Amino acid sequence: MPQMIEYDWTNLRADILGPGHGLTRAELEARREQARVAVGKFLGRVERGEVGFPRLPFQTEPVEQVEQYVRSLRGRYKSVLLLGIGGSALGPYALDVAANGPHPFRKKKIPAELVVVDNVDPLLLHRAMERLDPRKTLVVVVTKSGSTAETMAQFLIAYHWLRKKLGSKRAARQVAAVTDPNKGDLLAIARREKFELFAIPPNVGGRFSVLTPVGLLPAALVGVNIRRLVQGAGDIAEACRLPELESNPALASALHQYILDTRYGKTIQVIYSYSNTLWALAFWYRQLWAESLGKRVDRSKREVLSGQTPVVALGVTDQHSQSQLYMEGPRDKTVTFWEETTNAHTVRIPKLFGKYDSTGYLGGKTLNELFRAEKSATELALTEAGRPNSTFLFPRADEYYVGQMMMLCMFQAAYAGELYDINAFDQPGVQLSKDLTYALLGRAGFDAERSRIAAYRKQKESLEKK
């Protein structure tokens, strides 16, 4: 059996943090049945086909379609311009960084460079098109709805750029679209223009879609081993379906964060990544946790205002910018460390200036030892201060273990949704903002939103005059 990511929650226990600061054996036992029920309810939704992400690692057709397409393009492109936002960009970017290294410290040989344009700040797309060679650029446009304003605007600009530089026929061959298989304007346009087309299963939401062509296609294009990725996800999926806390790290961590939030006021979860390779993955997790659990009402339509606020920190960099707050500031945070137990590179510190106190003790040691010591010291300092913290230990930060972690985190968010009794798979707050944007830009069918905007502006103007 391959090695699994390890979840160490010792430093969440009241036994080590002190009374009133951590989880007690009694309250965990009292919640055991609630956790079992959460598993049953969620897996019931999976069996009914309402939620599709747990089955993705076992579906071979999307992987084969992606691999066949990537083989057909081998050596043709130097850049992959990814147009998408939220789950359409964060997952692919995390996979790229995990496999090819953080920017600008990349592997020497990468099949193509991933250029992610996940914002409509005009500077980004302008600079991308200014720098990229249109003859050597493949455009990948990703939106499940097929109508996301930001992505469709980017697409119109990028496709016009390709057509202007290359002509219509060649431009169409340099676009791949990832969207819903049955509906949406992007699907219609892709069929009309004969783009290469990839499907997002209807029962897989955007932030849960990284193991569909949303993540698999751009990742494979830049050299990520997507078979190892889905193998890792599949290998941990069985453990994530178990009803017992001791055997299921996704369930245990979901319950721990739920209790820390609702009982101990830990409304902020800091993801402290002691790995530059995993840092991009932390931003993917930030969306998953925030958008899944941040809900105004529960399933009974009672106002609950649920959810922890996820914050991303990088060790050791943020020991010098954030740790002071985490150590001595408000007791509203729990820290979750992400740590690699092995590193692919060893860098030795030279024995220079040995007579000086600040350099003598470092000579002959490695940066690896210093890095591990920094994490251990931060963990101990937080624990002594009564600040709850836990650690996910990655044997390595590669495709296999990133696949494990992505699947674990998606199950964790699903189980947390059951514990909070909210729908972890919608995003009504985000949708309202989208609808108001459509109204502001004159899209048909949003008259009610235009009326709300007019009323808001009138109220604001009257207050400004006072």
Image (cartoon, rainbow, N blue to C red):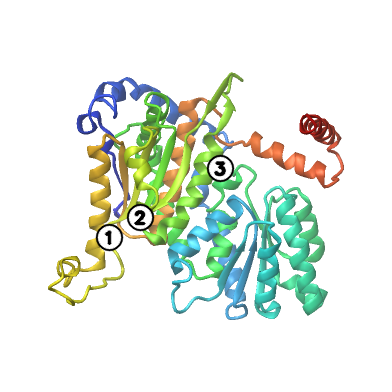
Does residue 57 appear to the left or right of 218 in the view shown? left
Q: Are marks 1 and 2 in contact (CB under 8 Å)?
A: yes
Q: Give the foreground label among 3 and 2.
A: 2
Vertical position of residue 57 compared to residue 156: above or below = above
- Residue farthest to the left, as pictured: 355
Instruction: Give the residue at x 45% y 72%.
Output: 106
- Name which residue type carries label 3: Gly
Which residue in the protein does label 1 denote? 371
Image quarter of residue 253: top left
Vertical position of residue 170 compared to residue 326: above or below = below
* SS for callout 2: loop
Query: Which mark is on residue 462?
Result: none
Q: Are marks 1 and 3 in contact (CB under 8 Å)?
A: no
Which residue in the protein does label 3 denote? 52
Instruction: Give the residue at x 49% y 58%.
Output: 94
Q: In the image, residue 204 lies at what x, y percent? A: 59, 44
* SS for callout 3: loop
- Name which residue type carries label 1: Phe
Does residue 380 appear to the left or right of 456 in the view shown? left
Question: How packed is label 3: few (under 14 Cα within 10 Å), some, or many (20 or more)?
Answer: some
Which residue in the protein does label 2 denote? 315
Q: In the image, residue 337 lies at what x, y percent? A: 34, 47
Q: Nearer the viewer, residue 194 or 455?
A: 455
* SS for callout 1: helix
- Name which residue type carries label 2: Gly
